[in-house]
Image (tube, rainbow, N blue to C red):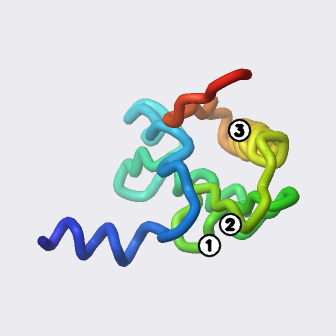
Amino acid sequence: MEALNYRNETQPKGLSAGCTFRNTSIVDAMRIPTPDRITSAGYLVDKAGLKGKRIGGARVSDLHANFILNMGKATANDVTSLVKLMKDEVYRKFGVQLALEVKTVGF
């Protein structure tokens, strides 16, 4: 029950496919360095300044930056463009290559 309450408080509800990226390695977390060796991809996306960033109908969640939300009528191109931006900005700022957690179909 405690885990469910934590998830409800820290993860967005609504139209999302879940976490977009896998968490990073402990090696990356130590190299950057992140607080307490956090390996959270969402932490890196947040620190890259992308919370709330929107492309078309797709937006990076303000609650948890590893979630892309469909704000209504998001296209596959909107989502893939936002994923690319997130990956590029995290790499530019931290030198970390994010790997997708979600499975893509058709591209």
What residue lies at 49% left-to-right and 69% top-to-bottom?
Answer: 12
Q: What label sits on residue 83 in the rendered view?
A: none
What residue lies at 64% left-to-right and 61% top-to-bottom?
Answer: 69
Q: Amino acid at mark 3?
A: Lys
Q: What's the CA distance linking mark 2 and mark 1?
A: 5 Å
For the C terminus, the image quarter is top right
Q: Is residue 41 visible?
A: yes
Chain-order first, disc 1 or disc 3: 1
Residue furthest to the left: 1
Chain-order first, disc 2 or disc 1: 2
Dots 1, 3 in contact, CB < 8 A: no
What residue lies at 53% left-to-right and 54% top-to-bottom?
Answer: 42
- Which of the 4 quarters of the picture holds residue 36? bottom left
- Which of the 4 quarters of the picture holds residue 23? top left
For marks 1 and 3, give the one nearer the viewer. 1
**How many residues crowd around disc 3 within 10 Å: few (fewer than 14), some, or many (20 or more)?**
many
Q: Amino acid at mark 2?
A: Lys
Q: What label sits on residue 62 in the rendered view?
A: 1
Q: Where does the image place residue 8, in percent across and percent down from the top left?
A: 34, 73
For the N terminus, the image quarter is bottom left
**How many residues crowd around disc 1 within 10 Å: few (fewer than 14), some, or many (20 or more)?**
some
Q: Amino acid at mark 1?
A: Asp
Q: Where does the image place residue 81, in percent across and percent down from the top left?
A: 82, 42
Q: What's the CA distance linking mark 1 and mark 3?
A: 17 Å
Residue where numbered disc 2 is placed: 51
Dots 2, 1 in contact, CB < 8 A: yes
Residue where numbered disc 3 is placed: 87
Chain-order first, disc 3 or disc 2: 2
